[in-house]
Amino acid sequence: MFRRNLPSLFRISSSNQFSSASKSVNEEKSRSLGRKAVSTALLCLTGGVALSAIDDLAIYQGCSSKAMDKASKNQEVINAIGEPVVKGPWYSASLAVTHKRKSVSCTFPVSGPQGDGVLRLKAVRDGDDSWSSFFRPRNFDILILDAVLYVPGNEEAQRTLKINISDDVPSPACQACTKCPETKSPGKE
């Protein structure tokens, strides 16, 4: 009896083997497709974060260099911490950028031979918002620029000075406003 059932046992098991083999191949294909999708999504996410970081670094470099130009020419800053005024390391700076990168708040360290301090600025971007503007350098106008300087004194431990640097910049020339033509609304006559 066992002899008669033995060949039928092999036939059943071999057909089950083929169907399970085809199922495992399909499962493996779907798993590899899922793995590829996840790895592609992670790669895109990493690239987006890297682009954002590089963009923030470019904004910081542009704004801090403009602020350093103004600070190094300010006589009160030169009198307080000496000349040359040197920008501190970028990793000690803080940068806050709005959602569409229209305005920036930045704080970074400065130092001179007689003391050190912090420059704080607020700036707004002028220009368009197109996709091509992402690849061009942005021009930021500094609205507020303050220096908080720590100068060591002879008798006291440390003297703190707050200097408003943006007052040194002349305001743009005022232009006379032109009167807008009145428009008639359709309901009023």
Image: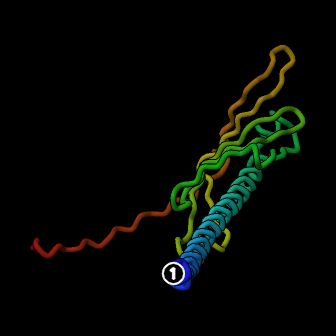
In screen coordinates, is 9 left or right of 141?
Answer: left
The residue carrying pointer 1 sits among few (fewer than 14), some (14 to 19) or many (20 or more) residues within 10 Å by Cα, namely few
User: Picture coordinates of residue 170 (x, y %)?
Assistant: 63, 52
Front-most of 165 and 42?
42
Would residue 82 be seen by someone viewing this image from the given angle? yes
List the residue tagged with mark 1: 5
> Disc 1 residue type?
Asn
Looking at the image, the residue that sits furthest to the top is 155
User: Picture coordinates of residue 64 (x, y %)?
Assistant: 72, 53
Q: Residue visible at 81% across and 28% down?
A: 151
Q: Residue visible at 80% across and 33% down?
A: 80
Front-most of 83 and 136?
136
In screen coordinates, is 163 left or right of 26?
Answer: right
Would residue 166 be seen by someone viewing this image from the given angle? no
Q: Residue visible at 53% across and 55% down?
A: 98
Quadrant in which residue 52 is drawn: bottom right
User: Picture coordinates of residue 23 (x, y %)?
Assistant: 52, 79
Vertical comparison of 79 with 166: above or below: above
Vertical comparison of 187 with 154: above or below: below
Q: Residue visible at 66% across and 51% down?
A: 169
Label 1: element kind: helix
